[in-house]
Image (cartoon, rainbow, N blue to C red):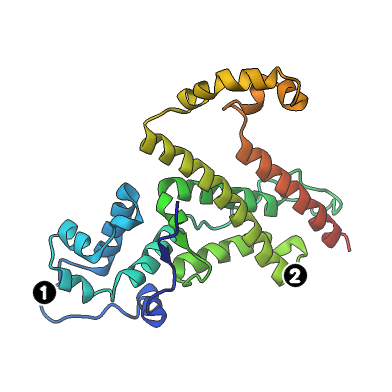
Amino acid sequence: MTTTESSGSGDVSRSMELLWGTGERATRGPKPGLTLDRIVTAAIELADAEGLAAVSMRRLSTELGAGTMSLYRHVPGRAELVDLMLDRVQGEGAHAPEPDAAEPNAAEPDTVEAAPGWRKTVERAARDELALYQAHPWLLSVNQTRPVLGPGAVGGMESMLAGIKDTGLSDPELISVIIMVSGYVSGVARTQVHAVEVRQVTGISDDEFWRAQEPMLSTVMTSGRYPLMAALSPEAFGPDFDHFEFGLQRLLDGLEVLVEQRTKR
C-alpha cells in the first residue's frame, strides 16, 4: 500500500479551525442540507468502501447530490478534508480509562495487583487501534508524521495518559509508550490489511497460494540444507496462533519491568 496523502499537507490553520468548531461559517436563511458533518461522514464511508484514492471533491459532490463548489463553502479542499476524516475516526477509538477491577487494600499497602491499571489501559488502546485499522484500512495510506491535533487525537492521548500516568515514567517516556504501542499495532494492521488486499486483487486464496509452492518446498526441506526450518511443526505457520496478542503481551512484559523499577524507588 503506497502513501497517497499526508496529514497536515493543506492549510493547517483552517483545518484546526474546522476541527475545533471555530471554522464552520454560518449562512443566512434556512438551515442548509449540506453540512461539514455530512461531508466528512460521506468521505469516510467512501474511503472505507473504495480506498482513500476514491475520495475527491467531485466524487463527494455526486455522492451527496450537491454541486462541487458547495463543498468548498464548508472545507477548503481535499487535504483539509483528510485531516477531518483522520480526527473523526481517531475519536472513535478514544475511551475513558476504566476503573481498576480490584483496588489494593488500603490496610495492606504491599498488595500488588495481578494486572496493573496501566497495563489494562495499554492493552485496550492497542486492541482498539487494531480494530480501527480493520474498520478503516485507508488509515494506513496516510502519512501521519505531522498529525493535525483535533479533539479526536487529543482526546485519545488524554485517555491514554490518564491510564498510564502513575507508572513513574517521565513525560517523554509516557509519550514514547504511546508511540511504541502505536508503531507495533500499525505494523500488525498493515500485514493484515495487505493480506486481505492480495486475496482481493489476485483472486487466489492463501491455501491456494501455499499449495502452489508445496512441491518445490517439500524437495528443498528434505535436502538437509535447512534442518531447523524442516524440523518446525505444522502448527508453526498455522492460523490458530494469535501473533498480535503474543507480541502485545511480550511488549507489556518488558514495559512492566521498567515500571516496577520506577515505582519501587
- Along the line of sight, the residue nearer the viewer: 161 or 18: 18
Q: Is residue 221 left or right of residue 160?
A: right
Q: Amino acid at mark 1?
A: Pro
Residue 99 seen anywhere in this rendered image of the structure = no
Residue position marked by numbered label 2 in the rendering: 170
- Along the line of sight, the residue nearer the viewer: 2 or 109: 2
Give x and y (percent) for residue 168: 78, 64
Q: Image quarter for residue 236?
A: top right
Q: Secondary structure at mark 1?
A: loop
The numbered mark at residue 30 is 1
From this viewpoint, which residue is outermost toward the left? 29
Q: Residue at x 45, y 51 (%)?
A: 1
Contact? badges 2 and 1 (CB < 8 Å): no
From this viewpoint, which residue is outermost toward the right? 265
Q: Amino acid at mark 2?
A: Ser
- Along the line of sight, the residue nearer the viewer: 185 or 89: 185
Quarter of the image that includes the C terminus:
bottom right
- Along the line of sight, the residue nearer the viewer: 55 or 111: 55
Q: Residue at x 10, y 79 (%)?
A: 29
Q: Residue at x 67, y 60 (%)?
A: 177
Task: Please tell me whether residue 15 is drawn above or below residue 255 in the rendered image.
Answer: below
The mark lying in front, picked from 2 and 1, is 2
